[in-house]
Image (cartoon, rainbow, N blue to C red):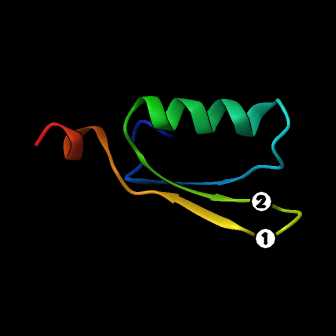
Amino acid sequence: MVKQSNYVLVVWNGKPGGARKILSFARTLGKIVIQIDPITFEVRTDLKSTSDTAQ
């Protein structure tokens, strides 16, 4: 699913597990990642993709 996505939305509490693995994988593929902390509701965005950094 991550490979076919343009954006990846991850709700992650900062602990090891499935969401952390998805977050890492999405970043490795250069996907745009929107991360939500379920405790603080802080939203972080990784806007650069691999194709953006190559330019």
The front one of 16 and 22 is: 16
- Residue that appears at 83% across and 49% down: 13
Residue that mark 1 sits on: 41
- Residue that appears at 21% across and 47% down: 52
Residue that mark 2 sits on: 37
> From the viewer's perspective, is residue 21 above or below residue 52?
above
Q: Position of residue 19 (x, y in %)?
A: 73, 40
Q: Position of residue 34 (x, y in %)?
A: 55, 59
Q: Position of residue 28 (x, y in %)?
A: 44, 29
Quarter of the picture containing the C terminus is top left
Q: In what element is the residue under mark 1?
A: loop
Q: In what element is the residue under mark 2?
A: loop
Q: Could you tell whether 31 is left or right of 38 in the image?
A: left
Say which amino acid is labelled 2. Asp
Q: CA distance from mark 2 to mark 1?
A: 5 Å
Q: Which of the numbered marks, if any, corresponds to residue 9?
A: none
- Asked if the residue under mark 1 is in contact with the one under mark 2, i.e. CB atoms within 8 Å, the reply is yes
Say which amino acid is labelled 1. Phe
- Residue that appears at 28% across and 37% down: 50
